[in-house]
Image: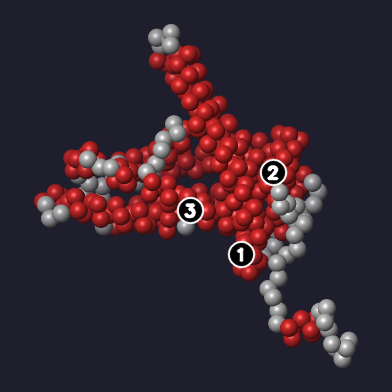
Amino acid sequence: MTLLAALPLAVALRGMIEAHLGRSLVASAVADGMDYGWWQEFTSQASGLAETFSPVIIGFAATLGNISGLLDAQRESFLVTAALAGYLLVWTFLSGGIFDRYARQRRTMAHGFFAASGVFFWRFLRLAIVAGAAYWFLFSYVHGWLFDDLNTWLTRDLTTERVTFLWRAMLYAAFGVALLAVNLVCDYARIRTVVEDRRSVLGALRAALAFVGRHPGRAFGLYALNGLVFLLLLAVWALAAPGAGGTGLSMWLAFAGTQLFLLARLLLKLQFMASQTALFQRSFAHATYTAAPAPAWPESPAAEAIVGGPHEPSYIR
């Protein structure tokens, strides 16, 4: 799904690069390997989507760039934002079926999965709007207060870079905790929506806050454990991530390695969802329980008559 979301942007960026290179001699040099001189020339006059084509997109630098951009509240171009919004919309649809599958702890087949996805999509979409408002408040106001006002006040009389760095690192940690807290509450709001078949988004959020408040050690401990696994994945990726340059087989091996990292990150995300669902159900002693009935594939009228429906003929009785 990540590849499909990025593919239109990659095609558009390819056209920009092709138009910039044309039939020049530099085009042959770039085709044989990375030319940093041309790359700097291209980025110096780039705008919009082309601005994203920088050395930070290669290997582990891309991961660090994404984390840094998130913590520093950097804005993306319109096309990147649109692609991200489309990706999140599809993920919002699929997450209902995923949570339902984990809550039932058995196969729900394709019709059950997509039926649950459709049932919970609009509820999750309303929840995403509320979560988006919370994230907007954090990035628009809390981020500015921490890094513009408080950081300036704390470091205005300091002359040691090490102490200045420590203060900024502490502010990054505080802002990260605020983001994770919102994410944690929204996760359990989605879980309570699915397991208890809740229709009210505000009710699900209040219930999620109550659950986290009653079980803070379990909820934050599980989140920290999953986060540790994510950090281990990042450490492995930092050692194995490909660098710039290379053509032919090495280029495709680098592409395959990147896709494997994205697959591992997706599997870890599913592990997050499964473990949080299991924790919630175990805490309320109703494992495999969901309030909504399991979606069933509709049968023909003849089949319903045979199994005994509301209009069962007398001769079948």
Q: Secondary structure at mark 1?
A: helix
Name the N-terminal-most of marks 2 and 1.
1
C-alpha span from label 3 to label 2 = 25 Å
Q: Residue furthest bottom?
A: 315
What's the residue type where badge 2 is placed? Leu
User: Mark 1, residues whose alpha carbon is within 10 Å: few (<14), some, or many (≥20)?
Assistant: some
Work out which residue is located at the far left of the displayed protein and give it. 25
Would you say the residues marked 3 and 2 are in contact, meaning their CB atoms lie under 8 Å apart?
A: no
The residue that disc 1 covers is 114
Q: Earlier in the sequence, mark 3 or mark 2?
A: 3
Please tell me whether mark 3 sits on a helix, a strand or a loop. Answer: helix
Q: Nearer the viewer, mark 3 or mark 2?
A: 2
Q: Position of residue 276 (x, y in %)?
A: 67, 46
How far from the left and from the top, in percent, is residue 230? Answer: 53, 42
Q: Residue at horizontal 26%, vertical 47%? A: 245
Q: Which residue is mark 2?
A: 202
